Image (spheres, rainbow, N blue to C red):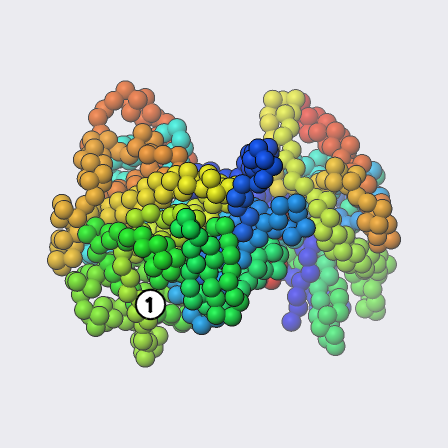
Amino acid sequence: MVRLEIFGDCRASEATLLVSDSDRFVPQLPLAQLPTQAPALWDTNGHMNDRISRIVIVGGGSAGWLTAGVIAAEHRIDSQAEHPFELSLIESPDVPTIGVGEGTWPSMRATLQRIGLSETDFLRECDASFKQGTWFRNWHTGSGDTYTHPFTVPIDYAETNLAPHWLALADAPQFADAVTAQTALFSDCLAPKQITTPEYAFVVNYGYHLDAGKFAELLRQHCTEKLGVKHIKANVSQINATESGDILSVTTDRAGDIAGDLFIDCTGTKSLLLGEHFKVPFQSRQANLFNDTALAAQVPYTEDEQPIQSCTHSTAQTAGWIWDIGLPTRRGTGHVYSSAHISEDEATAQLLAYIKETAGDKAAAGLVPRKIPFQPGHRREFWHRNCVAIGMSSGFIEPLEASALVMIELAAGMIAEQLPPTRDVMDIVAKRYNQKFLRHWDQIVEFLKLHYVLSARNDSPYWQDNRAAASIPEKLSEQLSLWRFRSPWHQDAGAVDDLFPTASYQYILYGMGFETMPRQTRSYQQSQRQAAELFRKNAARATQLRQALPGNRELLNKVREFGFQKL
Amino acid sequence: MSQYEVLNKEKHRQLRIKTGYGAALGDAVMYAMTYPMEFRDIQGCYPILFTKDPNTGGFFAAAVLGFEADQNLFLQDDTWDASYVPAVMQRQPFLIATGGEDDKQAPVVSLDLKHPRVSQDEGEALFDAEGGATEFLNQKIALLDKLHRGLQHSRGFIDTLLKHELLEQITLDIAFNDGRKESVQGFYCIAEERLYQLKGDVLESLNQAGYLQPVFMAVASLSRMRDIIERRNRLRL
């Protein structure tokens, strides 16, 4: 065997770097601009008010450790400091984490970078791969139709709305293909970057697929070894209140009482602090989104170097849909469905049929999917007194747009940035937090419901029930009425921190054949030539990307061998 | 395309290698890889920047010869207009492969049979009538040996630059006299501000490893950028 050494040839054409697309799809998680001048913390007698300096997170998993990482990276944990700041995480050694939520948004790149993890370590340790969007199959008619929701906004989206121009085209390619070059990478399982692209940078925007168990483990290690988070392995047996009703401390079975100023509930669906202790009511969203059960199964690859998909695959069934996520070592699949519309046996049979179809009979033989029942919905408020719930303790909804991890990132980010300096101002922050996250939940419900409302499937009551007017949130009904006459664009954005940008609505609407009859306005006519040019430019960019970008598997193998450079 | 083979005195007995310079001989390249032990010679003629190997993402030093793909501004028909030609160009069409008969890691002399310098009837012979290496081949082997050692030393150099965060991205935005603008991306240079903040013990360790002098040579070499911009301007006027 002859292995060639470097310096064979170094032609510039091979090394030309691609310029990245804009990153506007990412929900912004800006680094906190902490006030340089601390607010007055001392009363006139020279006594410090109730400074918030001890944070206690109850529960590990992705939610607990991600929250710990984001807060600890922002607030220096230093026992020698004048005002020491402590962050402890109490994790039960007996309760296994549930380990769902294997898809992230592009925001995760900024979050990991903020925590101080290297992307190379993250990819290697968490069996992670690159996710560039979602590929939907059988959602529209149920007879083999497909469309995509990529992580890149349409070309020139800030300046030009291509949707009306695309609608006017006679022989148009699919909407996403016409307006972004990213989808051209999906059919051949191509990666969003090259090995020469620095870590966390991209050629086209991406998030990750990952092994949630390994992710929590990596975060735990990083938080405890690098960020100074105190890890307490114990079970919480009792919650102790102050006279005012705040949580004073939690009593544990093997670490005594742990006192804190702010308690973060990451105890999963149990919702130990917010739900059980404070009795904050649960708000069901099942009237809008019916799915309440998931059956999860891991599927091995059939060949060693089988390509790894660039997207989450989502295939609609008669009473739910099947997710399919490609990790380097295995695929993760699952059927999420409405137990009111299909029996567990039938749902299992559909999942096994899917696995047979995509991985062969052998892969399906003997597979027993793990059943995860859940209640779709969320707490009425998330921050109550000195306790805030993050992750499944605050709510859970089907993973159709992978919103679980991004909600944790947003929650942890807001707490890190707006951490109340004293108990006095905590209620103000809590009020704003609750308003913001209720708005996020509403939007998640509306945006997920959009996928069902637009379906033309008539093969089961599930799809018909999903289109019943009573099941559609009012805001979504209104939007759909408006969008019959103009396509969503910047004017439809509700707030700067909207979870789903208007571009995402465009991808779903026009991916599923929604008809908009735009007016022939002056601005439309003025942008016609520009639009034709953009369609051409996009097609050229797609060709260029397809030639330059490696396969996901190839790139991940290189990351394993060489790693990404930091710059 | 390339076709690499380990040099074999039976199989390659009749091969000849074209000497001289020219685009047709494969010299029209935008940059040439270099290494710290060569920086003294390189910096007198070319700017030294750093770029990434497209196969591994790893950094290497490069003598910049042009501003776009296949543009070598030092090439004028059949002459290379500089007092020193980078070793990585002089060694063509030879390279080093690993994989000796006994020791799989041993470096062995190889060549690219599809390289335009390789000929059946023109140029310098590799072997004499008795099958011994010619003076020409011996010179190339000595050059390869130097290159091999230089590149191995270079790895530690690059790792050290990265460890101390002494590289930073540089984008060359150049407006030429003929009105054309070029934005050259994918290059890195020495981060001078950080270099000047290095403390005594770090400087000493860099010096002992033979890395300190080449760092400053790379910094100084950027003054050669004026020369290649001038060459580019002359090209179009």
Please state the horizontal and vertical placement of residue A64, each as a whole percent of the image.
Answer: 47, 57
Q: Nearer the viewer, residue A558 or A352?
A: A352
Please state the horizontal and vertical placement of residue B172, each as a whole percent of the image.
Answer: 65, 33
Quarter holding the C terminus of chain B is top right
Outermost residue, top direction?
A522
The residue positioned 42% from the left and 51% from the top of the image is: A243
Q: What residue did someone put label 1 on?
A: A296
Give the answer, above or below, for where B175 lies relative to A251.
Answer: above
The residue positioned 66% from the left and 37% from the top of the image is: B170
The residue positioned 65% from the left and 71% from the top of the image is: A1
**Residue A46 appears left or right of A498:** right
- State the count of labels: 1
Please state the horizontal and vertical placement of residue A181, each as a whole percent of the image.
Answer: 41, 43
**Residue A115 appears left or right of B226:** left
Give the answer, above or below, for where A482 lies relative to A521.
Answer: below
Three-letter amino acid code of the residue under disc 1: Ala
Q: Nearer the viewer, residue A371 or B182?
A: A371
Residue A84 in view here? yes
Residue A146 in view here? no
Outermost residue, bottom direction?
A366
Quarter holding the N terminus of chain B is bottom right
Please state the horizontal and vertical placement of residue A511, each as a whole percent of the image.
Answer: 27, 45
Q: Nearer the viewer, residue A218 or B18?
A: A218
**Residue A104 appears left or right of B63:** left
The residue positioned 51% from the left and 41% from the top of the image is: A422
Give the answer, above or below, for where A184 lies relative to A64.
Answer: above
Label 1: which secondary element: strand
Chain letter of mark 1 equals A
Q: Nearer the viewer, residue A297 or B210?
A: A297
Figure quadrant of residue B229? top right
